[in-house]
Amino acid sequence: MVLLLPGGPETGTGRPSRLSVATMLPLARRLVRAGRAEGLTAHAVHYRHRGWNGDAAHPAEDAAWAVDEVVRRYGDVPVCLIGHGMGARAALRAAGHEAVDAVVALAPWLPEPDAQLTPEPVKQLVGRQVLIAHGTNDQRTDPELSYRLAERAKKINRDVCRFEVHADGHGLHHHRSEVQALAADFLLGSLFAHGYSRPVADALAAPPPLGLRMPLAAGFGSTLPR
C-alpha cells in the first residue's frame, strides 16, 4: 500500500484544495503500474485542514490515521508513505507507525533552524527505508535543510539516502519522469524483493555526504515500467 500526502501551506484550518491531491495522482498512477504484479494499491490522503498549523501538525496526524485505516481494512500489509512539500514532512513524522516500512519525501518543507525550536525528530525513522529527493533550485523549501535532516537520520539509520535533482524547483517538474522512476524503484526495492537499481543501492551504501547528495541522472529509469 502506498499513501500519498500532498503539500499545503504552513497554516490554515480551512478545507484543503482539491488541486493539492490532484497533483499527486500522476505519481500514484506510475507507482501502481510499476507494482501491479505485486498487487500494489495507492490512496491519496485527504487532510482535515489546509495547513501544518504549528504543534498541531495536522497532516502528520492525518497520515497516522490513514495508516491505521490501512491496517483496519487490509490487515498486515507493508506501507510506504510518499509526500511532497508539507506532505513530505508529514510522511517523515508519521513513519514511526509500526505498519510503515518505507518513506519517500519529495522536496520536504522543514522548519528553519531556530534556537527556540526542538529539532525536527528523526528517531521514528529507525528501521524504515528512507528516500529524500530535492531540487537544487527549490525556492520554496530549502534543500540544505533536507540535507541536514538526512544527515542526522543517517547517524541512527543506515537505510537513508537523498538525491539532488539538478536545477529543478519545488514542483520537480523539469525532471518529473526521473523523479517518478526513482520513487518507483525505491518503492519496489523497499516493499518487495526486487532489489534497488545501482544508483539507489550506491546511495544507501555510501557514507555522508556522498549518499545524501547523490545526483539524479537525466534519463534515470527510462527502462522501468511507466
Image (tube, helix red, strand yellow):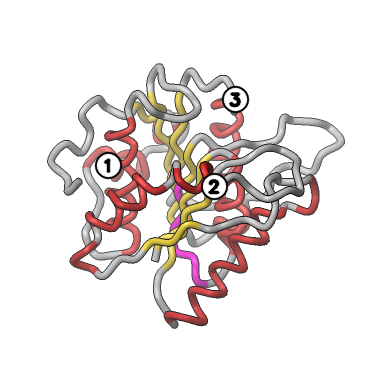
How far apart are the alpha carbons under marks 2 and 3? Answer: 21 Å
Residue 177 is situated, as x and y percent measured from the top left of the image, at: 28, 35
Callout 1 secondary element: helix
User: If you read the primary sequence from the N terminus, does the residue marked by circle 2 or circle 3 appear first?
Assistant: 2
Determine whether, in the image, residue 118 is placed left or right of residue 71. Answer: right
Residue depicted at 67% across the width and 57% down the height: 48
In this view of the protein, can residue 154 be seen by the observer? Answer: no
Amino acid of disc 3: Arg
State whether residue 149 is above or below residue 13: above
Residue beneath disc 2: 18
State whether residue 68 is above or below residue 209: below
Q: Nearer the viewer, residue 178 or 32?
A: 32
Residue beneath disc 1: 181
Q: Provide the residue span drawn in magenta.
A: 99-104
Callout 3 secondary element: loop
Determine whether, in the image, residue 142 is placed left or right of residue 107. Answer: right
Picture disc at residue 68: none
Residue 93 is situated, as x and y percent measured from the top left of the image, at: 62, 54
Q: Nearer the viewer, residue 224 or 157?
A: 224
State whether residue 173 is above or below residue 19: above
Residue 111 is situated, as x and y percent measured from the top left of the image, at: 70, 35
Amino acid of disc 1: Ala
Residue beneath disc 3: 140
Q: Quadrant of the N terminus?
A: bottom left
Q: Are marks 1 and 3 in contact (CB under 8 Å)?
A: no
Membership of 103 in magenta stretch: yes
